Image (cartoon, rainbow, N blue to C red):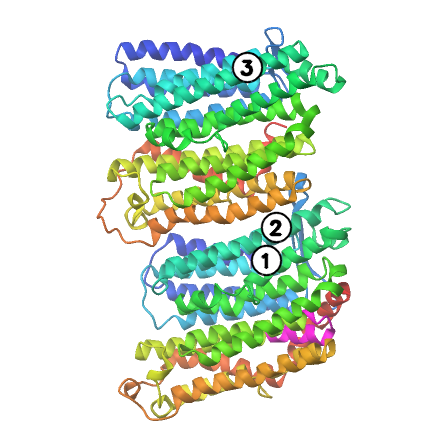
Amino acid sequence: MIAILILVFFGLLLLFAGIFQMNKILMPLSAIALIAALVCCFQSGDGAAFEAYKNMFLFTTYARAFSALLIFTTLLIVILGPYFLNEDMHYKGDKYALLLFSLSGAITMVAAQNLLMLFLGIEILSIPLYILAASQKDDLHSNEAGMKYFLMGSFATGILLFGMALIYGATGTTEINVIWATILTNGFNQHLMLLGVFLILIALLFKVGAVPFHFWVPDVYDGTPTLFTLFMSTVVKTAAFSVLFKLFAFSFNGMSHDWKLIVALVSAATMLLANITAIYQVSFKRMMAYSSISHVGYLMMALLFIKVMPAQSAILLYLTAYSIASVSAFAIFILVQKQSNSSNFDAFEGLGKRNPMLAVAMTIAMFSLAGIPLTAGFFGKYYIFSVAFTQYKPLVIIAILNSAISIYYYFKVVVNMWFRENEKHYEVVEMNPLYTAVITLTSIAIIVLGILPNLIIEMFW
Amino acid sequence: MAIILLFLPLLFALIHFLFKGDFAKKTALISSLIVLGCNIVLLTQFDSNHSFNFIEHSPWIHDLGISFDLGIDGLSMLMLLLTNVLVPIIIYSSFGDERKNSSVFYALILLMQFGLNGVFMALDGILFYMFWEITLIPIWLICAFWGAEDRIQITMKFFIYTFFGSLFMLLALIFTYSQTPDHSFALQSLYNANLSGTGLYFVYGSLFLGFAIKMPVFPFHTWQPDTYTTSPTQGTMLLSGIMLKMGIYGVMRWMLPLAPEASPSLAKWLMILSIIGIVYASIIALQKNDIKRIFAYSSIAHVGMIAAGLFSLNIDGWQGATFQMIAHGVNIVGLFFIVHIIEKRIQTRDLTHMGGIAKVAPRFAIFFMIITLGSMAVPLTDGFVGEFLLLKGIYNAHMWAGIIAGTSIILCAVYMLRVYQLSMFGETNSLTSTFTDINMQETIVLAIIAILVLVLGIFPNIIFELVNNSVQSIFQMTL
């Protein structure tokens, strides 16, 4: 709770700092806010759930773990900010403020114990993002991305709200716990409830970008300024998925036989479509967009669990691994993109010779996204597979096929860096100390979590 | 003790990654010799009456039942010896070449050695899988970095193909784990798992897929000839000499004892598949002119024989397979080194451009002959003992299977002698007349291999004494 207050307060401060052109302190100020919020996540309560505003919020261990992940990822993203935002000098304060506001929305979502709060959280998360997506005003693609994201997002929000209204109609409550209890007692209107659950499912699938609601993802990711693409593909995805898991693993679990098959089909379709499309991309950014869709496909397998506890650990670990590797990959991509002015794969040609350490870090990130052992991504996949395997064997086999396919496009980057000559004569990529720090940190984290994955789980449970 | 042997190559690999220098060759050779020394020290303390020596056990990821379990029995010891003897030979065989970034090259070879040692020592399912995959990355990098033309496409196929197979292996392990009474990935717990019905066949089939792609057994071999041909010589040696033995070792240690109940109905089909592979690969080998490709196909044929011996499910076949693993490792490394020598001198591997090399390079011709004879399974060479036992095993399982598999010995002699005749005998041409005989370094490599070929052929008991107990006890579990 305090974390949200801190973030909003510092967000306002940043707006003022922006007005007075105090560009130097923007990043440190937001970093302080994030670190303070991170500390709050670890301090509030000792294992016991913390309740606020008449059961509107419930800071369980689950909420705290995901909040910590969200804040940590945002912290890394903010550190990447100053160098990235160098060119468009205007309104820099706004961007940091919007990131923090959006994050506060994400934490609200994760901690919400009431459907209304959840809805507010999603809105607080999304509205700053619409602005951030369109923040490169002179770039048509960015405008297009903002517009698309806004239209699609509001549409999904409408569906979500409709679903919530139906559930309220069926059960007479918006509290997540009470809904869970009501479903178990069967004292509700079946049809209304079912429709409501499916509308919520559709809306959330929109938000996480699962097939068949994924069409906006590549365009939006491609057009949005790269740093905010990173925010979308990590923080937003993590928040949306943790909500998806919370609702479907807890509240709607009583009627799981109604939705499990659909989730399984969506998961399979998401993996297959995203992975196959990703193969044909020439733009690294679009490839990462499809890759993020495919990761949603893997994650959705965790909704088909038998026991809640391992499934929770599985998605926490998976999202951590995914977020860290994405931060690393995008940080390197930003550096490379600035040098070569190209967002295609060929921008990486000969990077192994130009900047060997950068290429090593990128290789580690790609290995992790592909799920090669000794990286965090492997254990992420391992947990998910073992959670889903006992029940849905064919689905896991599809997932394995997709893992093998995904090797192809992740390794395309590796191949370009190490085995292709630098035919376009790109110069050595200019390094930035903050980027070096983030990339080093994430690379080490990937390897450490690849050897000791339970560190992250023991930290919270 | 086992830990030292395991992590020593990793340490050396890291050192080679970090430091660049002109003496990377020499330091790499010294490193691998130190590892070999360490292995020999272990051998002297090894007691083949115990099932597992040098057991290490420490918890790793407790919630998931994964622990860091190492142990060495006779079979593991044999595989470790094969690895750690061949790696110095492979490193030394590269002394005559100059290549870019040589310290990285040797670092990758040592990293590969780390993974291989781990595979042969691991007694925990996930640990085994991790090491299994660790070996894949350095070999992929070696092939894709220093390979010939089209290497990127070919190595990508190789990587995806084998990765796909090993993911199935992982699934099988996860499934078996879910059926263990004590929820543990330890080898013994996995053996005790209650597998039944479709689960049993799933485990059997998935493990087979993982191991068969690695070996490779027909029809999963399509990555192999291209990969062997495009890889740099040392990469091909690592792949064929040691890495494919991971698949055979996997069948012996992990597949057949894990789901023995599936064997009676499935093993014979797998044996038939292997035998088809033998004949198929031998016939293709007869028609090729690229010697590296011929040896690649001969490798498929020999491995098919080993696999058939394992799936014949009798002790003769198993002993033959164990012996033949070593013999094939030694022979194939020698053969690929011979290809390397020829290619380096005349810049082609095409048989039709060769001839008369024996006249100008008699020493080379002698060593080539010894290794060819070993590969053809002539008595008193290492190939004979293994193939004889393998054929006996296959024949015991089914008469016709034995007879068809037996033709491979004839076919093998035909294509090996064809290679020898077309390259060594006949008139010299403009290419081969300037062929210089092998130098000191090449002589040493070939001499070591030739000595191994003869010693193993004349005194096969040194291997059987080491492995007999463990092979017997593993074999008992597969029944």
Distance between the alpha carbons at the discs numbered 2 and 3: 43 Å
Callout 2 secondary element: helix
Which label sits in the foreground, 3 or 1? 3
Amino acid, disc 3: Phe
Based on the picture, tell me whether residue B277 belongs to the magenta stretch: no
Residue B382, visible in the rendered structure: no
Residues at marks 1 and 2, CA–CA distance in whole angstroms: 9 Å
Q: Is residue B322 magenta?
A: yes
Q: Are marks 2 and 3 in contact (CB under 8 Å)?
A: no
- The residue beneath circle 3 is A162
Residue A41 versus residue A441 in the image, above or below: above
Chain letter for mark 1: B
Q: Amino acid at mark 1?
A: Gly
Asked if badge 3 and badge 1 are on a common chain, one would say: no
- In the image, taking residue A98 as reference, residue B256 lies left or right, namely right
Residue underneath mark 1:
B210
Q: Quadrant of the N terminus of chain A?
A: top right
Point 40% across, 76% down: residue: B290
User: What range of the chain is rendered magenta?
Assistant: B311-325
From the top left corner, tell me how far across and down residue A227 is, in percent: 35, 28
Label 1 element class: helix
- What kind of residue is marked 2? Leu
> Quick one: which residue is furthest to the front in this view?
A191
CA–CA distance in space, label 3 to label 1 = 49 Å
Secondary structure, magenta segment, majority class: helix
Q: Quadrant of residue B211?
A: bottom right
Where is residue B21 shown, x and y percent of the image? Answer: 33, 59
Mark 1 and mark 2 residues within 8 Å of each other at the beta carbon: yes
Which quarter shows the C terminus of chain A? top right
Q: Which residue is mark 2?
A: B170
Where residue B268 appears, as percent x and y from the top left, is: 70, 69
